[in-house]
Amino acid sequence: MSYAEFPAFDWPAGKRLALSLVINVEEGAEANIADGDKYPEAVDELGIALRKPLRNHANESNYRYGINAGAPRVLDLLEAHGLKATFTACAVALERAPEFTARMVRGGHEACSHGYRWANQYHLDESAERDYIRKAVSLIEKTTGTRPYGWLSRYLTSDNTRRLLAEEGFRYTMDDFSHDRPFWDHTQDKPLVVVPYAIDTNDMKFWSDPAFSPDAWLRYAIDTFDWLYAEGEHAPRMMSLGLHLRIIGRPGRMAALRAFLEHVAARADVWVATRLEIADHFARAVPRGQA
């Protein structure tokens, strides 16, 4: 669908742009020999992907940094600006970090499911994938007190994923990068809103490209925001900013996040919302039959 084919709608209170802050919580749910995985986690800031059944204690400690030091900084900054974020969280990660999880819940943030563990699901058959989704829902509800209504896979999905999510009571999926606004998925019988994610504004670039600087990331994030804000004068737009506790939570990167939030705060007509708020608002504004 092109933008011209989408039905028109407005953000709440006439806001020009919806901003979604997405905090990925994967720490403690990554691959680990100690958890019975065949190999240790391959995603490593040093770029060392071990393909041996050997524990990578160094990388494990890099992930723990996200919970130990990154999480308090990120939560403090959100609290200082009075902002709510969507924490795309692996169920096991929340279970293994109860103090962080309790503070996330107290802050009124949304827990969106990022899977049971930080693992691929695309290779699972339908029954196994449904069980994987249900396990994630059950554990997140146990640790937060509320079941998740949104979903983000690790990279790839199966042909069954969206249908299974709709059947299991999810209201939206993030597994899409095709637009700068939400839309309905028409490929299955049960309704499911697609709230597209964005890779280009993601802080993962700090790991994938060691030469990438906080200044470059900040400039790109601000340019993205400004462009979408300008387009929002004529049509609804949303921006996603993807972050990780272990990545953006480093001292040398937090100033860039603070500067971005200060830039956003200078605009009164921006709706900083959770993805569930965005999905539910869209569903009310554009009933499925009209989309």
Image: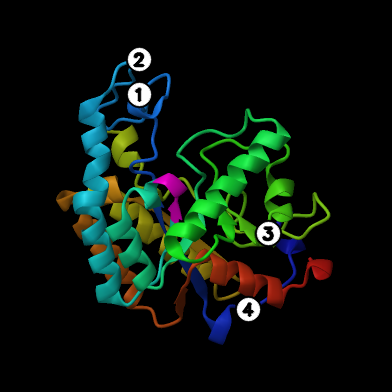
Which residue is most to the left? 251
The residue drawn where x is 80% and y is 49% is 187
Within the magenta stretch, is there residue 89?
Answer: yes
Which is more N-terminal, label 1 or label 4?
4
Question: In what element is the residue under mark 4?
Answer: loop
Residue that appears at 31% across and 66% down: 103
Asked whether disc 2 touches disc 1, contact meaning CB atoms under 8 Å apart, the reply is yes
Badge 2 or badge 1: first in the primary sequence:
1
| Residue 138 seen anywhere in this rendered image of the structure | yes
Q: CA distance from mark 4 to mark 3?
A: 26 Å
Q: Can residue 177 be seen in this snapshot?
A: no
Q: Are marks 4 and 1 in contact (CB under 8 Å)?
A: no
**Amino acid type at image mark 2:** Pro
- Residue range corresponding to the magenta coloring: 88-92
Q: CA distance from mark 1 to mark 3?
A: 33 Å
| Residue placed under numbered mark 2 in the picture | 53
Q: Nearer the viewer, mark 4 or mark 3?
A: 3
- 81 vs 29, left or right, is left
Q: Are marks 4 and 3 in contact (CB under 8 Å)?
A: no
Foreground: 19 or 42?
Answer: 42
Q: CA distance from mark 4 to mark 2?
A: 53 Å
